[in-house]
Amino acid sequence: MASTRKFQLPFDRNEAAITWRVVKSSPMTLAGAVIAVAFVVLAIADVVTRDAILPYNPYALTTQLLRPPSLAHPLGTDDLGRDVLSRVLAAAPIDAEVAFSVVGVAMALGLLTGGLAGYRGGLTEEVIMRVTDIFLSFPGIVLALAIVAALGPSTLHSIFALVPVWWPTYTRLARAETLSVKSQQFIDSSRAVGQRPSYIIGHHIFPNIFPTLLVYATLDIGNVILTYSILSFIGLGAQVPTPEWGLLTVQGESYLRSYPWIPIAPALAILVVAVGFSLLGDGLRDALDPKVRGTFG
Amino acid sequence: MGEAQTLPAAGGGEAVGFADAVLTIKGLVVKYNTFRGELTALGGVDLNVRRSRIIAIVGESGCGKSTLGLSIIRLLPVPPARVAGGEIQFAGKNLVELPESQMTRLRGTGLSMIFQEPLSSLDPVYTVGDQLAETIRVRDERLGKPSYGPFRVTPAPEESHRTASRLLGARLPRPRVNRKYPDEAIKALREVQISDPELVATKYPHELSGGMAQRVMIATALLEKPSLLIADEPTSALDVTTQAQVLELMRELRDEIGASVLFITHDLAVAAQIADEVVVMYAGEIVEHAETGQLFSNPMHPYTEGLLQSFPRKFKDEEKLKAIPGDVPDLRFPPPGCKFHPRCTYAFDRCRVELPLAKEVSPGHRVACFLRQ
């Protein structure tokens, strides 16, 4: 008894170990975690080694045109003789960059503005929410197109264009969550203790609404990649020789009947990453919930 | 304070001096704007709370008990509610007019409140120890003490860092390992009769029982050392045995740190057990205010009488419990004159037109009823 008690003592519980146990407990979450980690590791490794880890140079043209999948080219080659697998893998960094920056910045902005609007109420809320309404009143794609067209096509500009489209959703979500957290008694309790509003927002509101936003963000990663691919398709995102999943898919589209591996491989990559992150998101919500963690601690 | 009068035997001195008053409320009027019209939740409340006294505020649901408590600490939901008049004197300041920033400084140092549902009063994402440490941090900040230094236990790492490390699953500095809650927090938990406080400090609120959570809330109050604690039905959600423990703790709070407690309850038995004085409220007004023994042995106001008759007493089975006839008046359209007259068996003509004001009928016993004047 004494020894088990000792184990539970505050000072030597390992949070990471608990997280791992929660994630491990569900095969779906585990799958999501594997996909997400693989995606991130691949993206970083590819940038660091400058494409050296890829089986072929993703830009090199060869005479092996439109070859079906084989041992030499597991996903075949495209109309210019480039290895499809290498091109799909080489697209990971650029898609990771766009997806994480857009979702990350949108989430940070949403958390701040939404938390503030929900907690302060009154004029602050009115102003912030009407501004989100203005942004939401544009069709997202049109707004992004307008911005990126004005700035000129590039990956960075695509991020600049997508963030204004993305943040209002997070603000609305954060505000709604804040309203429900705010009505709970521990906020009143905290005020009764004499906490300043800034502290309450930072230390009571944010930690309580963060899991919800995080889950939404992981579901959203796939959406960002898809929208970015639309920008690329129109010619305002990634530029032609650059491997990018959306661009690869739309470029290969005309070969769907005759040489299906060319469009399907990058499309599958989008699908796998999107599904992987949403599975991970579900698991993370559990992992962040003290109630669930308790049963694994 | 400051007077030569010391305070050992709390409430020993009978002189109701204003110098002794922790809180003085004069003519407090609180109104709520509802969709169907404005209602007067508090219609001119006068109350004087002395040092080291436990004052029970009793009354039916909707009589304004909680509104009174919340308006003192200024946690009323402000858009529907508004203070329409009167003043609340506390620590030499009129709380009604105090700017919010100063009010924030006052809450938790001089003035504190605990709520009815202990489990929802604790933030679900922090451990008990974290929340107590937070209270200590706020208090020390107010007192001008630095929250770091060679003689202080390092403050617990911020939640955001832990969240980040959880997400990364990093082996990095192992957040919980060097984590220690301030000794004072552990001590406060021990003081509220929590066995194994080191373990309880690491628990999240959902792992506690209602009684434990309420004791944690009281531990918070102990740490703040307020001169006035407003307790809004702190025992209503608890079973009888934990109720008794919590009441005992309240009494210790009074005796050890000389705090006054405004104990809001609808349970007369609880009031009788804990309070030094009892305030009876009806329809937003104080109808009777007396020493506990006085009030229970010699109720002066017909409403108090009715309340006592509707409450079971020890094994007196010859009497049937009597309910007070009628219903609480709609506060949007209160009856003219005494608000209790439609339900009062003694009502006469004057009651229907004129509002009786509270008068001191015997030392320390104030009643708002024409029968006694």
Image (tube, coloured by chain):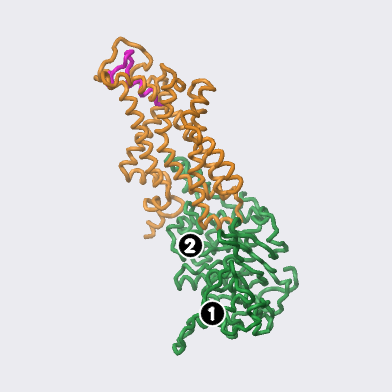
Chain colours: A orange, B green
Q: Please identify the dominant SS of the magenta region.
A: loop
Q: Is residue B148 left or right of residue B196?
A: right
Against A103, residue A176 (above or below) is below
Quick check: B162 left or right of A52? right
Q: On what subunit does the disc labeled 1 rest?
A: B
Q: Is residue A82 magenta?
A: yes
Residue that label 2 marks = B213
* Residue A296: x %, y % from top left: 37, 50
Front residue of B140/B305: it is B305
- Which secondary structure lies at badge 2? helix
On whether residue B109 falls in the magenta region, the answer is: no
Quadrant placement of the C terminus of chain B: bottom right
Is there one chain holding both mark 2 and mark 1?
A: yes
Query: Which residue corresponds to the image point at 34% horizontal and 31% vertical from the top-left?
Result: A271
Q: Magenta segment range?
A: A73-92
Q: Are marks 2 and 1 in contact (CB under 8 Å)?
A: no
Q: Is residue B53 shown left or right of residue B5?
A: left
Instruction: Look at label 1 and name its amino acid.
Output: Leu
Give the chain of mark 2: B
Residue at the disc numbered 1: B307
User: Residue pushed farthest bottom?
Assistant: B318
Occupied quadrant, residue B76: bottom right
- Up the image or down, A106 lies above or below B316; here it is above
Number of the front mark, 2 or 1: 1
